[in-house]
Amino acid sequence: MKKIIITLVSTLSLLLILTACGTKKPDYTASTAESALNAGKSIDGKTIQFKVNKLEPSSAFGYNMQTGKHLNITNTDNPKVKVGETVTIKVKTTKSVLGSWIISYTDLKK
């Protein structure tokens, strides 16, 4: 009986460790990404986790998820998210347009 309990506890511990290794924290939040961009740093290839504050499905840049003070997360494909959802994206490119940051992305995760 003692061996069975030890085996079960060991197996559960191993599963928890392996699960924790598979999760990765994002590189930036909306505010830290905006600060980095304003400081002249490149965030291309990095991940950002943010709350969608506003959606503009037909902006000049495509589907636009707005967050932060001046962050516009854009793609030509519908992200199928709702205002208030928290998502994580991988930054493809960034550019500054009229005082706002336009960020194209890949790998949207809810």
Image (cartoon, helix red, strand yellow):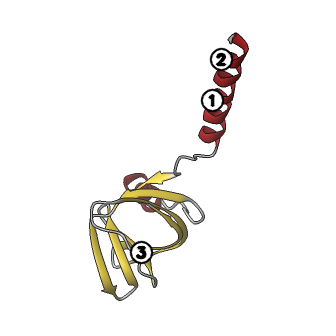
For the image, the number of numbered tags is: 3
Please state if 2 lies on the left or on the right of 60 as rendered.
Answer: right
Circles 3 and 1: CB distance less than 8 Å? no
Spatial separation of the CA atoms under disc 3 and disc 1: 36 Å
Q: Where is residue 39 in the image (x, y as percent from the top left)?
A: 46, 57
Q: Which residue is drawn at 57% across and 66% down?
A: 44
Say what secondary structure mark 1 lies in: helix
Q: How far apart are marks 2 and 1 (CA)?
A: 11 Å
Question: In this figure, which residue is indicated by the disc labeled 2?
Answer: 5
Question: Which sits earlier in the primary sequence, circle 2 or circle 3?
Answer: 2
Image x and y of residue 42, in percent: 55, 63
Residue drawn at (71%, 22%), measured in percent from left and top?
7
Question: From this viewpoint, which residue is outermost toward the front?
Answer: 1
Which residue in the structure is indicated by mark 1? 12
First in sequence, mark 2 or 1: give its number. 2
Crowd band around label 3 with a 10 angstrom C-alpha radius: few (<14), some (14–19), many (20+): some
